[in-house]
Amino acid sequence: MNNVIVDYRISSGEKLILEQNGYNVILTSPCNNLYTAICGHPDVLICIIDKNTILVHKDTPVDFIEKLKNLNIKVIKSKNSLNEKYPFDIILNAVNLKNTFIHNLKFTDEFLYNEISKKLLINVNQGYTKCSTAVISENAIITSDSGIAAAAKENKIDVLFLPYGDIELNGFEYGFIGGTCGLLDNNTIAFYGNLEYYKFGKEVLTFIKKYNLTPLYLREGKLVDRGSILFF
């Protein structure tokens, strides 16, 4: 069975849709060092190294780590702890593709950097790199961050660049596109919400169709930023 890691605050309906589509849903454990809005976001707490290896933040509860180990996953802890003060909250919030790693490399956790150092490293100013980026394929992304868009294009990554806004995130004016979704396989991308309610939904649908992706809507209504859905 395929596995996905999601924010522990996912609704029962969203969780059920994932399960009905054949996914084993693993809920994050909240990190009390972070502010409430992102304390359970997978893309802040975790970085998937590859299908067999996951790096978690240093203070991850033992029971969560055991869940991963029971799935025969090698678990690595970060060198540093997360903290709500920037940049200590973004040390794992990177876009990690098969051959490419995108992040503000000044703040990448040392142990994470060791795992990806042989890849093509793309440095950007945006520390919330994964929050800001929806991965569509190994060579295609969606982002609202101009720095990420420019750096990706320079490295021959196809980019759909969208304005900020029209994404819900509790406590903030808006959320980020990367936190609304997650690539589940070569054919499916799941969204917390329905693109019909998103101001730029038509553009997203056209872009993902180019990569033969079908959207799986986990809820009706506007897109919500719950942190990236992490598939392994």
Image: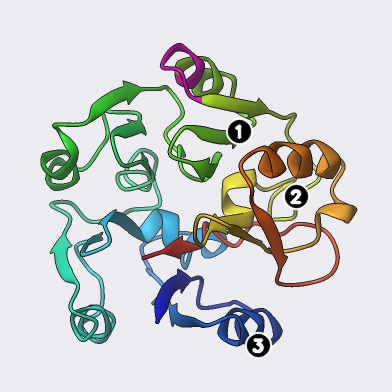
Q: Position of residue 167 (x, y in %)?
A: 75, 49
* Residue 170 in view in this figure: no
Residue 27 placement (x, y as % from top left): 45, 79
Is 100 above or below relative to 134? Answer: above
Q: Quadrant of the N terminus?
A: bottom left
How far apart are the two marked residues, 2 and 1, measured between alpha carbons? 13 Å
Q: Secondary structure at mark 1?
A: strand
Sequence-earlier tag: 2 or 1: 1
In the picture of the structure, the residue carrying the numbered disc 3 is: 12
Q: Quadrant of the C terminus?
A: bottom left
Residue 141 drawn at (x, y percent): 55, 35
Whichever of callouts 2 and 3 sits on the residue coming sooner in the sequence is 3
The first of marks 1 and 3 along the sequence is 3
Residue drawn at x 54%, y 57% as measured from the top left: 182
In screen coordinates, is 162 left or right of 184?
A: right
Q: Bounds of the magenta span? A: 152-157
- Label 2, on which residue? 167
Find numbered disc 2 in the image and state the secondary structure of the residue it sits on. Answer: loop
**Picture quadrant where residue 113 is located:** top left
Asked which quadrant contains residue 199, the reply is top right
